[in-house]
Amino acid sequence: MEIKNRSFFKDPEKDLLWFKQWVSELEQSNNRQYQSIELTTSLGKTQVWGLNLERVDLEPLVIFPGARTTALFWDFDRGLDQLGKDMRIYLVETNGLPNLSDGNSPDIKGLGYGEWAVEVLNALNIEQSYVAGASFGGLICMKLGIVAPEKIKAAFLLNPGCLQAFSLTLKNLYYNLLPILSPSRKNVSKFLDKAVFYKPTHQLSPASEKLIIDYEVFALTRYLDKTQKPYYMDEQLEQVQVATYLLEGDQDLLFPFEKSISNAQAKLRNLKEVKVFPNVAHGIETYLEAIQFIGETIQRHT
């Protein structure tokens, strides 16, 4: 696989140690420990966190994170408990994002990320799985759906970044650029409050809010991000044949929900259901009712 860009931490030894300590704090907050797997892929080392991995009798769920996040965001406040059933959960740290995986990334518009996702599933000995992705992660799910549809039982897209271009409204640009240009805790908190969450309906506990602010300040100040950002996949989406569920927050500034739904209905040939959550913003993977919907839908499938 051709590597398009290479992202990296400014001080890898120090910064990776900080990240591992952050994971420990999340584990303490959630009162559980994540299993850790390191895989070798075409993009270098890929880190995977897991829950119930020894339970081969359980249905697998593979999760891909959004840009400038870690897959562990899905379990703030033990959010994955909302699935309502035990599953083998694989939290994949996408290469090229600020996490423990190597920073190599392919051309975003090619199928490299889909080929990489196949490598990940094969290395984990997963023949077929439910997959879920938030924002950037939704794009990964669709790339996988093109490359190896037989690997997917059903895909869940949460405010995905592949159904339209990033919104260029002044409000969205302001809140997204603010922490990038001036990555203070105050500006990161403002970005989270205005673009990621929608209080009081959609918010985290104080402990988890501190963790997400810590992470975002760290990612903005310590990681040199060269990875290309999500784009509207347009005609590529027509190649996706897998059963797909779209979960949208009606307060998403980054990818306004009406346009995403319209494009999904026009392009996705096997769109099973669209679920809109009122008063929920872009960080929908942290919204407990969204995780609950995924769990209930998987139970219907099985």
Image (tube, rainbow, N blue to C red):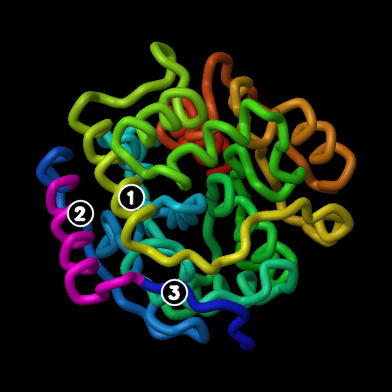
Q: Residue 56 bears which disc, if any?
A: none
Q: Position of residue 258 (x, y in %)?
A: 76, 26
Closer-to-camera residue (36/100): 100
Q: Secondary structure at mark 1?
A: helix
Q: Position of residue 295 (x, y in %)?
A: 46, 36
Residue type indicated by callout 2: Val
Span highlighted in magenta in the image: 9-26
Give whichever of discs 1 and 3 has the lower sequence position.
1
Q: How many marks?
A: 3
Q: Position of residue 139 (x, y in %)?
A: 65, 55
Is 256 included in the stretch rendered in magenta?
no
Which residue: 62% across, 80% down?
4
Badge 1 vs badge 2, beta-carbon distance below 8 Å: yes
Closer-to-camera residue (148/298): 148
Q: Main secondary structure of the magenta part?
A: helix
Which residue: 54% across, 50% down?
133
Identify residue for label 2: 23
Residue 238 vs 170, above or below: the answer is below
- Residue 124, visible in the rendered structure: no
Identify residue for label 1: 72
Badge 2 vs badge 3, beta-carbon distance below 8 Å: no
